[in-house]
Image (cartoon, helix red, strand yellow):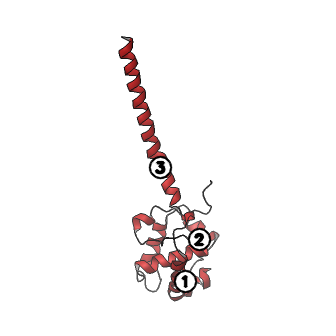
Amino acid sequence: MTISTNKWTQVVVAAAVVCGVCVWAAVAVPLHAQAASGIWSGVYTDAQAKRGEGVANKACVSCHGAELMGGEAGPTLVGLEFLGNWNSLTLGDFFDRVHATMPADAPGSLSLQDTSDLIAYVLKLNKYPAGEKELPTDMSALGQVKIEGQPPAK
């Protein structure tokens, strides 16, 4: 009887180890992957932000002012006011708002690429670091990137 109880114990322990590894993989790996694609990991390129500056100069400065610091008809898109409006939301939320409602005199007229480039420029103005890949136009990817005022703790 001791031999079969010992084997049963080994099976239960092995199953517990497998379950533990599965739970760890389900929790730890996505958290690591999410941190790697966060707003502080460089989600746009400098070249994209430069294109976005051109878009802003054509479509945004009349309301949002030079360098998007705020104007008579539009709020600042830089600094604490920007963070107050967008902190904890996602780049997907921001992209959707900009694409659907801007510019005010021609809502929805920006192309998906112009919208993405413009957002890259806003991120640069807000001192988020540039990276090696351009900010995509894909809403599901943008919806995974949370706008955060502070870099994650290491």
Image quarter hosting the N terminus: top left
Instruction: Find numbered disc 3 in the image and state the secondary structure of the residue it sits on.
Output: helix
Number of on-image labels: 3
Instruction: Find numbered disc 2 in the image and state the secondary structure of the residue it sits on.
Output: helix
Q: Mark 2 and mark 1: span between their CA atoms?
A: 17 Å
Amino acid marked by disc 1: Glu
Number of other residues with Cα within 10 Å of mark 1, as a class: few under 14, some 14 to 19, many 20 or more: many
Which comes sooner in the sequence, label 3 or label 1? 3
Q: Which mark is residue 82?
A: 2
What residue is shown at x 56% (from left), y 80% (from top)? Answer: 74
Amino acid marked by disc 2: Phe
Q: Mark 3 and mark 2: span between their CA atoms?
A: 31 Å
Q: Position of residue 16 (x, y in %)?
A: 42, 31
- Residue 119 can be seen in this image: yes
Q: Is residue 147 above or below residue 137?
A: above
- Residue 71 can be seen in this image: no
**Which is more toward the observer, 31 or 107?**
31
What residue is shown at x 38% (from left), y 16% (from top)? Answer: 5
Amino acid marked by disc 3: Val
Foreground tag (3 vs 1): 3
Q: Which residue is mark 3?
A: 29
Which comes sooner in the sequence, label 2 or label 1? 1
